[in-house]
Amino acid sequence: MGIRGLTSLLRESGLLPSFSTETGETFSSLDQHQVQPGSTLAIDGPGVSFHIYRLAYLQHYKNIMGQRHTYDNDLDLIAHLLPSMLHLKDVQRVTDELMHQLLRVHQVNVHIYSDGKKQRRKEETRSYRDDQRMVERENLRKFFTKQMLPSSFRSQSTPRSRSKNFKIPIPDAFTFMMEFPVPVLLFQQVEHSFRILARQYENGELHDSNVFFRMTQCEGEADQVVAMASALDTSNMTYAIGQDSDYCVFGFPMDHDLWSLGDIHVQVSGVRACVVHVIMCLDFCDE
């Protein structure tokens, strides 16, 4: 789940990659590394679900904004930009495309770790996130029942359209993702796609013996198991891929490196990512 506020602090200090709230593009001064074929990405299930959601919604936002002239007014445009309007088939498409690139094109193994029983020590964090979700759902209710928008929309500096029907500045995609809830069945859709893929690899249906795709249901939270899978691999070819700040402060030798899920670039030329140096994060936390 992460340590509240630590990720933002590490990003501001240049120890984690940052990203543009307008385009989603990541930028960082950290070292970059290319994933070699045969490497294994140990990935936190909830983290990769949010990553897929971000990729799918950014494309949805771009498509709708590219057609904004077809909508009658701003409220109609905003209704179509809501994250809850993201089709699950688009989530499935992004999931399948990402896994196809990793597994079939670049020959990288993928091991997804899902959360198990909830841990008591995380109750405060869960309560905080539950409160956030309540605010998001209330924002959605107010929009549809009263045409009320969150205050962040009124503070946007985006130029208004000259048309009389377009008077509300439209914020960037990340404002929508922060203010409104995710699609109801988002996590179930991603997990469903993963389970189909895992079954296909297990049954040999894809005829690709050079790589594997696996899913593991953890007893507790997945991030600790992900960290352990990477730290115990003496070949140094299993990489912990996550977004939580937990990875920066536990589970690794001090000279171990972490890869940021949000900064994995899957391109035709290969898979690249910025390397987060755990020892630098630990030294920063000690200051």
Image (cartoon, rainbow, N blue to C red):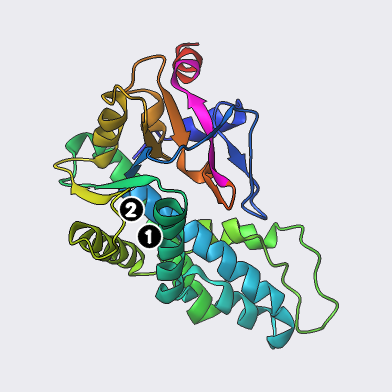
Q: Is residue 129 left or right of residue 277?
A: left
Q: Secondary structure at mark 2?
A: helix
Magenta stretch: dominant secondary structure: strand
Image quadrant containing the N terminus: top left
Q: Nearer the viewer, residue 271 or 276?
A: 271
Residue at (74% x, 83% y) in the render: 69
Q: Position of residue 158 (x, y in %)?
A: 76, 61
Q: Nearer the viewer, residue 124 or 263?
A: 263
C-alpha gap between disc 2 and disc 1: 6 Å
Residue 240 higher or lower than 151, as above or below: above
Disc 1 residue type?
Met
Mark 2 residue crowding within 10 angstroms, few (<14) / some (14–19) / many (20+)? few
The image quadrant of residue 123 is: top left
Q: Nearer the viewer, residue 282 or 238?
A: 238
Give the residue at mark 1: 134
Q: Position of residue 245 (x, y in %)?
A: 41, 32
For the question of whether residue 5 can be seen, the reply is no
Mark 1 residue crowding within 10 angstroms, few (<14) / some (14–19) / many (20+)? few
The image quadrant of residue 16 is: top right
Give the residue at mark 2: 130
